[in-house]
């Protein structure tokens, strides 16, 4: 099988079932951002690979990568159900956030994305996750989006924030504080 098809040379792409849509269609944008998110998660995993003490985070990221791939399939073929997000996926993210937060110092100021290479990669993935959520919300204004997609993406960005903070703590890398005025000051 070739790595190219020439099918998109005129600015359209095929969906499951054979329907063709413009490449700037909100569904294609949402799926493309999920693909970008999956790539950012892969970069975070690569950054974690050098630290064996973070194997559990790497394993959790591998699971989240599979879930993001499933989300793309769910969006691209909602009626066909080629893949599904586990029913408890959002709740599981919440449990993991709670576990990481329990070991983190309380935030007293905003922090800037940074810290270790792995922590920074997780912050970047968080930002891409936020965009994926916005695009899923925009898509939902235009067509039906399967239940749970937006909630999962919302929780995932919080999960990635907590993971970045936890990884930075475990790697002894301080979180750079934002030095600007706090809202209300």
Image (tube, rainbow, N blue to C red):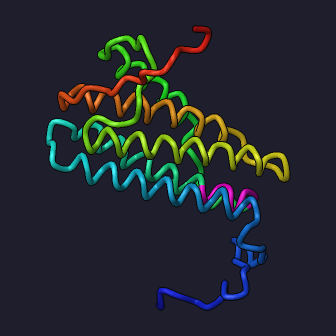
Label tally: 0
Q: Magenta residues?
A: 72-79
Is 18 or 118 nearer to us in this picture?
118
Q: Is residue 26 above or below residue 14?
A: above
Residue in the image at 70% along x and 77% along y: 14
Q: Is residue 32 above or below residue 59?
A: below
At which x and y percent is residue 10?
A: 73, 87
Query: Any magenta on residue 136?
Result: no
Q: Is residue 89 above or below residue 20?
A: above
Residue in the image at 50% along x and 30% along y: 158
User: Is 9 displayed left or right of 144 in the figure?
Assistant: left
Is 34 or 64 nearer to us in this picture?
34
User: Is 116 displayed left or right of 8 in the figure?
Assistant: left
Residue in the image at 73% along x and 67% along y: 24
User: Is 13 displayed left or right of 5 in the figure?
Assistant: right
At which x and y percent is residue 54?
A: 21, 37
């Amino acid at each position: 099988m070739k790595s190219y098809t020439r099918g998109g040379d005129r600015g359209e792409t095929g969906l499951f079932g054979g329907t063709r849509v413009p490449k700037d269609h909100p569904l294609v944008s949402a799926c493309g951002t999920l693909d970008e998110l999956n790539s950012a998660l892969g970069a975070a995993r690569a950054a974690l690979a050098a630290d064996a003490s973070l194997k559990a985070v790497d394993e959790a990221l591998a699971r989240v990568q599979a879930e993001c791939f499933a989300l793309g399939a769910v969006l691209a073929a909602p009626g066909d159900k080629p893949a599904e997000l586990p029913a408890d996926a959002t709740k599981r993210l919440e449990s993991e956030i709670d576990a990481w937060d329990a070991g983190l110092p309380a935030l007293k100021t905003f922090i800037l994305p940074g810290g270790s290479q792995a922590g920074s990669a997780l912050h970047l993935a968080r930002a891409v996750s936020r965009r994926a959520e916005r695009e899923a919300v925009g898509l939902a204004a235009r067509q039906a989006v399967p239940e749970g997609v937006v909630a999962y993406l919302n929780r995932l960005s919080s999960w990635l924030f907590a993971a970045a903070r936890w990884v930075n703590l475990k790697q002894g890398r301080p979180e750079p504080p934002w030095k600007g005025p706090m809202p209300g000051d």
